[in-house]
Image (cartoon, helix red, strand yellow):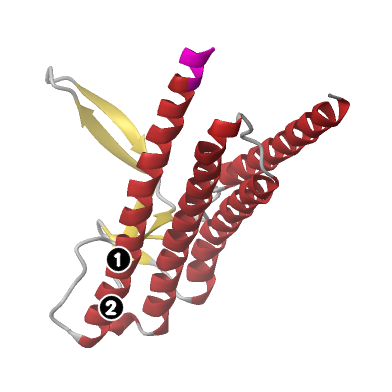
Amino acid sequence: MKTQKIKNKKVIGLIYGILTVLLGIGGITILLSILFFFLTLFSPNFEPFFPVVEVPIEISENASLELKNGSQYDILVDEAFVSFNVNNEYGFAGILNYLFFVSILVIAFYVILMLWKIFKSIRSSLKADNPYHYKNIWRIRKIAFAVLLSAILEMMYPLILKYLWFEKIHMLEKSFDLRLNFDATIDLFWALIIFVVAEIYRIGLEMRKEQEFTI
């Protein structure tokens, strides 16, 4: 039993350490993105080293796939993404693009922060053999809300671009329309699962309280 507790502490400590590193990386990334945004707007010669956002486009093109052994096969390209950097030439659309990008970054940072707080509380409470805390219930729920918000933003943003900004994308001597991003609907199911986990955690906490009162 004592050996198992030691293993649990090591696992929790490892996860806590990884989340601490990710928290630092996330904070630095957000600060750099803000810095790059202003540099891009006020310095015409500066361009960020990363694409700000990817938007799916409607495409259905025949292509060929060549294997390492030299054989070739006909394939259909039915999914592609267009990406572009923030640029003052885009005007309001460029700023909107940046705000969407930063929003996703902030949501990801917030999720990591909530996980960090959860594992910090579990790590500090292992000494008392009680990993259950009421605050963690709402922290888990907040993660679910954050994932839900991220999914909504990812679905709405291509819709905004499609009907308020983009007309056509021209390449390969052809024009293509934007495709709505329904891949983010998977995140809706993840949000639902996280809500269920929060309820399981709440029920576990209530059962533990009842056992303590019974004893």
**Residue 25 rendering spot, x and y as whole percentages:** 31, 54
Q: Which residue in the structure is indicated by mark 2? A: 87
Residue 168: image quadrant is bottom left
| Residue 184 % position (x, y) | 54, 48
Q: Tell me the magenta residue range.
A: 1-5
Where residue 65 appears, x then y in whole percent?
23, 30
Residue 178 shows in the view: no
Q: Is residue 2 magenta?
A: yes
Q: Please, what is the dominant secondary structure of the magenta stretch?
A: helix
Q: Is residue 75 above or below residue 60?
A: above
* Front-lying residue, 56 or 168: 56
Give whichever of 66, 156 is nearer the camera: 156
Residue 192 drawn at (x, y percent): 68, 42
Q: Secondary structure at mark 1?
A: strand
> Mark 1: few, some, or many residues within 10 Å (few <14, many ≥20)?
few
Q: Residue at x 45, y 62 (%)?
A: 106
The picture quadrant where one finds residue 105 is bottom left
Q: Secondary structure at mark 2?
A: loop
Position of residue 39 relative to residue 29, above or below, is below
Residue at mark 1 to residue at mark 2: CA–CA distance: 9 Å
Q: Is 105 placed above or below 127 here?
A: below
Question: Camera-side residue: 146 or 126?
Answer: 126
Residue name at image x 26 percent, y 59 percent = 173
Quadrant for the C terminus in the image: top right
Q: Are marks 1 and 2 in contact (CB under 8 Å)?
A: yes
Query: In the picture provided, is 143 more to the left or to the right than 109?
Result: right
Under mark 2, the amino acid is Asn
What residue is pinned by disc 1? 84
The amino acid type, in three-letter code, at marker 1 is Phe
Residue 83 visible in rendering: yes
